[in-house]
Image (spheres, grey):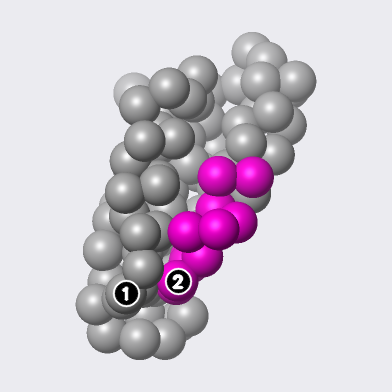
Amino acid sequence: MKLKLSVVVATRNRAYAIADCLGSIAAAITHAAPLDAEIVVVDNGSTDDTAAVIKAWASASPVPVQLLSEPRKGKGRALNCALRAAQGEL
């Protein structure tokens, strides 16, 4: 069964801010419940602890999270990576 909604986040070197961003998205999804949704996060070649922060956040998230990696810099590349993996209809 396909999910209804995939929320895509492309990020690079945002370890300091990504947890708040994801928390805000998860709160909106939870508030809209019941909503069959996921968060797809693409780490776009970060050199800080962004991936580790996302993994830690995702392990406690009430919303399913896919963490992807796109080492080639560029928002378009990151978004295309996310779109290929997203399971939502929207």
Q: Amino acid at mark 2?
A: Asn
Q: Is residue 52 visible?
A: yes
Closest to the observer: 62 or 20?
A: 20
> Is the residue under label 1 in contact with that under label 2 (CB below 8 Å)?
yes
Please say if 90 is above or below 77: above
Q: Residue at point 35% right, 86% down?
A: 73
Give the residue type at disc 1: Thr
Residue at the location (36% across, 35% down)?
56
Kind of element beneath mark 1? loop
Q: Magenta span has 14?
A: yes
Q: Which residue is mark 2?
A: 13
Name the residue at 33% across, 41% down. Answer: 55
Is 71 included in the stretch rendered in magenta?
no
Check disc 1 and report the residue beneath it.
47
**Magenta stretch?**
10-20
Kindly identify which numbered label has been placed on residue 5: none
